[in-house]
Image (cartoon, grey):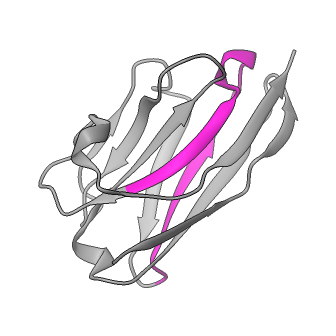
Amino acid sequence: QVQLVESGGGLVQAGGSLRLSCAASGRTFSRYVMGWFRQAPGKEREFVAAISWGGDSTNYADSVKGRFTISRDNAKNAVYLQMNSLKPEDTAIYYCATSPSTGVPGSSNRYPYWGQGTQVTVSS
C-alpha cells in the first residue's frame, strides 16, 4: 500500500508562487511515476504534471507549461510542484498521485494511489 500526503496549498494573489509537496510512504516509491492533478469546483479532475521514477522524464499540461515545474527527491520520498505566475484559473484542489506504470502518463485512470488533496486559491 502507498500513502500520499500533500501540503503547501494556500491563498495567493495572481502572479504569485506556491510550492506544493507530497510525502509518500510504503512500497517502492522511487520506482513509481508521480503525478499532480487538480480539480476545480464543478469541473472534472485534470492532469497537471508527471515525473518518471528517475526524474529524467516529465510531462505537463499545456495550461501550465512554462509556469509549473515538477521535481522529486527519492531519498526523501517526496515530489514537488513549483507553481509560478499563478492565475485565478489555477484555483483548485491539487492531488498527488502515484503509479507503477511506465512513462509519464497524463490519464488519471493510470494512477491507483491518491492523496487527499490540498487547496490552492489564486485571487485576482
Residue 91 appears left or right of 45: right
x and y percentages locating residue 36 in the rendered image? 46, 45
Q: Nearer the viewer, residue 110 or 52?
A: 110
Q: Is residue 77 magenta?
A: yes
Which image quadrant is residue 31 in? bottom left
Furthest-left residue in view? 102
- Residue 62 vs 20, above or below: the answer is above
- Residue 75 vs 114, above or below: the answer is below
x and y percentages locating residue 7 in the rendered image? 69, 60
Which image quadrant is residue 108 in? top left
Regarding residue 119, the answer to whether it shows in the image is yes
Stretch of the chain drawn in magenta: 76-97
Residue at image coords 62%, 24%: 40
Residue 101 appears left or right of 43: left
Residue at image coords 54%, 34%: 38
Residue at image coords 60%, 47%: 82
- Residue 33 vs 120, above or below: the answer is below
x and y percentages locating residue 4 in the rendered image? 50, 67
Residue 15 appears left or right of 105: right
Where is the C terminus found, in terms of image quarters? top right
Mark count: 0
Q: Nearer the viewer, residue 10 or 70?
A: 10
Regarding residue 17, the answer to whether it shows in the image is no
- Residue 65 vs 84, above or below: the answer is above
Residue at image coords 42%, 84%: 75
x and y percentages locating residue 67 in the rendered image? 56, 30
Q: Is residue 102 magenta?
A: no
